[in-house]
């Protein structure tokens, strides 16, 4: 994906017209946002196209801009983050990102699969049990699967979320990328066959064997799933992705204007923000979570590293250019889905104030 220079030294998100790209229907994903996968005819790669969250009365129409801004800010500050760009399909505007994996040899395993394989009582779909999703569960699951080397990248993600105010780092919004073994590839193909219905096209005798070996009640057997997660020795933590629940994306235009006229309201809004990853059974603020990690044995250094980097590398002028010019290509087309001036102003205020809090924490613990 190419990048283009805009006003001054600004690096702008690129604009893609994907109206003629082919939708890959069997790849479509779940989640709260309308997310679809398309094949780019130019490079033969898969791209994820995501619209803003809209359900009932909740219409967060600028959310995809939060995703793109987070991507640009993350890159500026040295985070391993998935690049997001602007995309148009017909009359629909959203953000687009290239697939993180080599489809032929790699598999993206969302964090929740490790957590559920480690603790089968973890039920993320049960809202009443949401406090199960805590740092200790993640830590213990990673250790049990010999993936503790990825705690550093998890800490980076937590610090980045604190900077942008991301409230939605649930178990599907971080992942580990595995290089396939023969067994893990076989399990992945069976799972795909179950999801797409391809398994039903097999001869009955073969279908029975596959189901008996791999599944129980229509799902992959727990012991097979555990082997699939345990066997790959070559792994990497996925780049930070799905960071759109940030920068006040849920605030309507009237609230944005009111907040800009009252800094106390902005401070109150920041103080109310909470991390999705719990501490023990409590949901706490991003800043409290970082302090807890800094005070935990063996974790201080991996949290201090990204805090030090953003403290030193946050350039207000570059950040301002990113936010002010993020929608330039769309604006120049006369498309009405650009980001309003007041919202850009709020994004900059939120970023500055959150950065100041992180700098205070860094100065206390360095």
Image (cartoon, grey):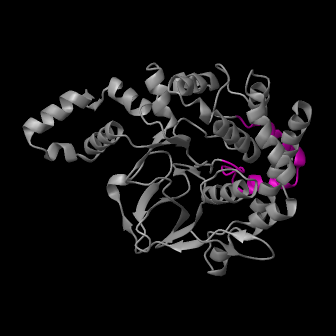
Q: Position of residue 210 (x, y in %)?
A: 19, 34
State left or right for residue 350 relative to residue 232: right
Examine the image and state in which quarter residue 298 appears.
top right
Span colored in magenta? 246-274
Q: Is residue 235 above or below residue 50?
A: above
Q: Position of residue 152 (x, y in %)?
A: 67, 36
Examine the image and state in which quarter residue 116 appears.
top left
> What is the total number of numbered labels drawn onto the structure image?
0
Helix, strand or loop: magenta stretch: helix
Q: Nearer the viewer, residue 243 or 142?
A: 142
- Check if residue 49 falls in the magenta segment: no
State left or right for residue 84 relative to residue 364: left
Q: Farthest bottom residue?
A: 333
Figure quadrant of the N terminus: bottom right
Q: What residue appears at the point 54 percent right and 43 percent down from the top-left corner?
A: 236
Q: Is residue 306 above or below residue 28?
A: above
Residue 38 in view (yes/no):
yes
Q: What residue appears at the point 81 percent right and 57 percent down from the top-left corner?
A: 348
Figure quadrant of the C terminus: top right
Q: Nearer the viewer, residue 112 or 340?
A: 112
Q: Farthest front residue?
A: 233
Q: Is residue 51 above or below residue 236?
A: below
Q: Position of residue 325 (x, y in %)?
A: 74, 70
Q: Nearer the viewer, residue 357 or 293?
A: 293
Residue 122 in view (yes/no):
no
Examine the image and state in which quarter residue 11 appears.
bottom right
Q: Position of residue 291 (x, y in %)?
A: 80, 28
Q: What residue appears at the point 49 percent right and 33 percent down from the top-left corner?
A: 112
State left or right for residue 246 relative to residue 110: right
């Amino acid at each position: 994906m190419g990048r283009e220079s805009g006003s001054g030294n600004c690096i702008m998100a690129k604009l893609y017209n994907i109206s003629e790209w082919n939708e890959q229907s069997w790849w479509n994903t779940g989640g709260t946002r309308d997310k679809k996968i398309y094949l780019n005819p130019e490079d033969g790669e898969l791209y994820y196209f995501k619209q803003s969250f809209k359900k009932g009365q909740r219409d967060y129409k600028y959310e995809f801009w939060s995703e793109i801004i987070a991507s640009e800010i993350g890159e500026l500050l040295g985070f391993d983050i998935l690049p997001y760009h602007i995309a148009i399909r017909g009359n629909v505007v959203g953000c687009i990102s290239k697939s993180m994996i080599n489809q032929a040899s790699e598999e993206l395993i969302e964090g929740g699969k490790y957590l559920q394989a480690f603790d089968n009582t973890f039920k993320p779909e049960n809202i009443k049990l949401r406090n199960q999703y805590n740092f200790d569960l993640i830590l213990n699951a990673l250790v049990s699967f010999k993936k503790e080397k990825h705690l550093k990248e998890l800490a980076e993600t937590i610090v980045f979320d604190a900077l942008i105010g991301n409230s939605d780092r649930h178990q599907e919004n971080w992942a580990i990328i595995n290089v396939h073994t023969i067994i893990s590839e076989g399990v992945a193909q069976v799972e795909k066959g179950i999801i797409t219905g391809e398994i039903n096209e097999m001869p009955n005798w073969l279908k029975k064997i596959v189901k008996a070996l791999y599944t129980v009640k229509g799902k992959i057997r727990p012991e097979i799933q555990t082997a699939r997660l345990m066997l790959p020795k070559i792994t990497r933590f996925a780049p930070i992705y799905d960071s759109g629940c940030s920068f006040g994306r849920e605030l309507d235009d009237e609230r944005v204007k009111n907040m800009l006229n009252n800094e106390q309201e902005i401070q109150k809004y920041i103080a109310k923000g909470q991390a999705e990853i719990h501490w023990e059974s409590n949901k706490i603020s991003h800043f409290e979570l970082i302090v807890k990690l800094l005070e935990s044995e063996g974790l201080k250094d991996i949290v201090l590293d990204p805090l030090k980097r953003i403290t030193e590398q946050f350039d207000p002028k570059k950040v301002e250019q990113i936010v002010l010019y993020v929608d330039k290509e769309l604006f120049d087309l006369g498309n009405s889905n650009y980001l309003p001036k007041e919202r850009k102003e709020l994004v900059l205020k939120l970023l500055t104030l959150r950065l100041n809090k992180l700098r205070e924490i860094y100065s206390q613990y360095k």
